[in-house]
Image: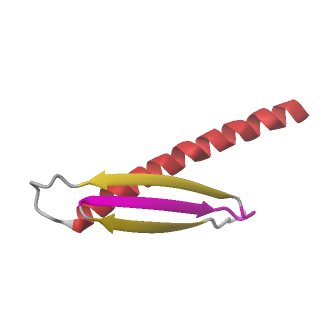
Amino acid sequence: MDTKQWNAEIYINERGNDTHVRAVLTTQDDTTIVGTGHARRNPADRSVPEIGDELAVGRAFLDLGHRLVELAGADIAQAAQQG
């Protein structure tokens, strides 16, 4: 069984009530896929930065997951045309 390693880097930028995240996944063959996420705290809510981080990172990973599935679909279509 082969073991592969892909690396993910998470960049969290907080500004005021907004949290923006960029999740960068790099595959073993140096393919890079980027997902983004955003969270906004209601000004009436208590400030708990970790909650915004969790929401924004989770949304970035969801976006990244969708992009991976789309990439796999494109790779399948290309392989079908070649073979």
x and y, in percent, of residue 30 in the image: 72, 64
Decide: is 56 above or below 28: above
Residue 44 position by quadrant: bottom left
With 65 as the anchor, is 58 left or right in this view?
left
Q: Which residues are magenta?
A: 17-30
Task: Name the residue nearer the viewer: 15 or 59.
Answer: 15
With 31 as the anchor, is 18 left or right in this view?
left
Q: Tell me, what colour scheme is on the image?
A: secondary structure
x and y, in percent, of residue 67 in the image: 58, 45
x and y, in percent, of residue 2 in the image: 72, 63
Task: Name the residue nearer the viewer: 22 or 31.
Answer: 22
What residue is at 25 percent from the left and 66 percent from the top? 50
What residue is at 51 percent from the left and 53 percent from the top? 35
What residue is at 41 percent from the left and 53 percent from the top? 37
Residue 74 position by quadrant: top right
x and y, in percent, of residue 80 in the image: 83, 32
Q: Residue 32 in magenta?
A: no
